[in-house]
Image: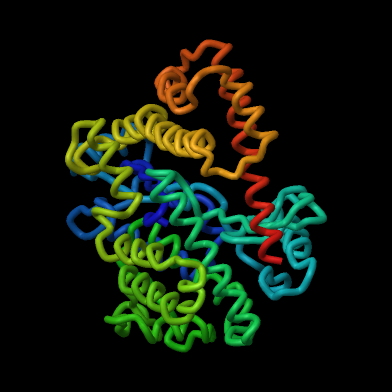
Amino acid sequence: TGSYSASPYRLSFHDFHPEKVLGFLSHELDFTNLRMLWSKWQNKADLRMPGGPVLPFGPDWFEKSMSKIFRLRGDYVSDFRMIDFPVSLLSTDESPLFNGIPGNDDRLKKDLASMGVFDKKMSVYTLYRMRSATVAGYTGFEGRYYSLFESLENDLEKSADLQTLITAMAWKYIINEDVTHDHIPDTPETESERRQIIFAASIGLPSFYVKKKTTSVFMKKILSKTVNVRNSTRYQGYLKIKTSDYMKALSMTIKEDAASLIESMNLEKTITDLDLRITDPITYSASHRLTSGILKKAGASHPLKIPADEFNQCAEEYYREELRAKHLHEAFSLIADEVESIEKGTNDSGHEARAAYYSALSTRNGVEFINSIKNLIIDGSLPLLYIVSMIHLLLILLYIDKKNFSAIEDNNK
């Protein structure tokens, strides 16, 4: 979160009512971790008056006056969607979700429904999960930790590669029995302990806390690679870990435990890119690049130097205008490359697909056609005849991609 995707957001002082700003976190973290995170967040935000942080209280006009008089600006978070959206429900003591027993998701839904906090008709939200073939008709993995990508080529592509690598690494752990359920206890407390880190990173908290005597052996392994870990002076029996140092330890764990996978999958560039996003986030992380685009539109140098409403309005306009146009330009560039490969004969498209391709474009050159219509599509002014040609072209390209992918699968069997 923040490294590959983000959703920058400004919170004003009068947004900091706990029941409002904490979103769904009370259903995703246990009380201890939530209390620590909330305390850390208050210290990070600009809510300070003589005597310490203060939270909004009283009628709306009073809170706004108070924020102006004492210049209480609120806060800026890099990935607010992770807080404002239910990304991962917390297990209960009676119904653990990650114990590997089939049907555990249905048992948790029933448990939460009996508590009045969830509807059994909804799917169970988790940060990462497998699709059930019996329910969806297909299987695969779904990540709910993605927000907005600043670039489809640089962010979406790299995050998909990293997700594939981590999934393969998990299977390697399982097959070799390097990690079992005993290494990652499935209790609400340990589940919350490991999950709090992604929420802390989304808010932009510099550190988080883990029990000295945590029962999560796998987390202990990662912490052994983390530098600058020290005892917490505020919470006895806890360790204080810097978020940035923990991210570096995660990268180190991947490079050590998935070295053979990185080589066989040709993902050396993906790991180099990951390290750059961690060590130089101002230049390479998605959150900073998205924020820079928003600030450029707003004419400001820092999120906290403009009112929250103005920043969020500029963010919405930036997403719908500049970011949308950038994504479409990237998409058209990729389409033009595929079209050029068909016309040069470097793409094994087959006679049937090539015939359909030339029929759809008539006598027009494919690359020239793409370049001539892309600005019209971005502006929403493309004539219907060209829209039909574009739809036909996309269907043909999808057909060729599917055919080539099936051929690769057959060769690998």
Residue 97 is at least partly visible in this image: yes
Direction from residue 190 to residue 326 in the image, left or right: left
Q: Is residue 331 above or below residue 175?
A: above
Direction from residue 313 to residue 366 in the image, left or right: right
Residue furthest to the right: 134
Colour scheme employed for the rendering of this structure:
rainbow
Q: Quadrant of residue 356?
A: top right
**Residue 245: x %, y % from top left:** 31, 73
319 or 275, nearer to the observer: 275
Q: Is residue 225 above or below residue 407?
A: below
Q: Residue at x 56, y 23 (%)?
A: 390
Identify the image quadrant of the C terminus: bottom right
Q: Residue at x 29, y 43 (%)?
A: 291
**Residue 115: x %, y % from top left:** 71, 58
Instruction: Give the mark count.
Output: 0
**Residue 173: x %, y % from top left:** 58, 81
43 or 380, nearer to the observer: 380
Direction from residue 53 to residue 125 in the image, left or right: right
**Residue 88: x %, y % from top left:** 58, 59
Q: Is residue 229 above or below residue 244?
A: below
Q: Residue at x 73, y 49 (%)?
A: 119
Q: Quadrant of residue 180?
A: bottom right
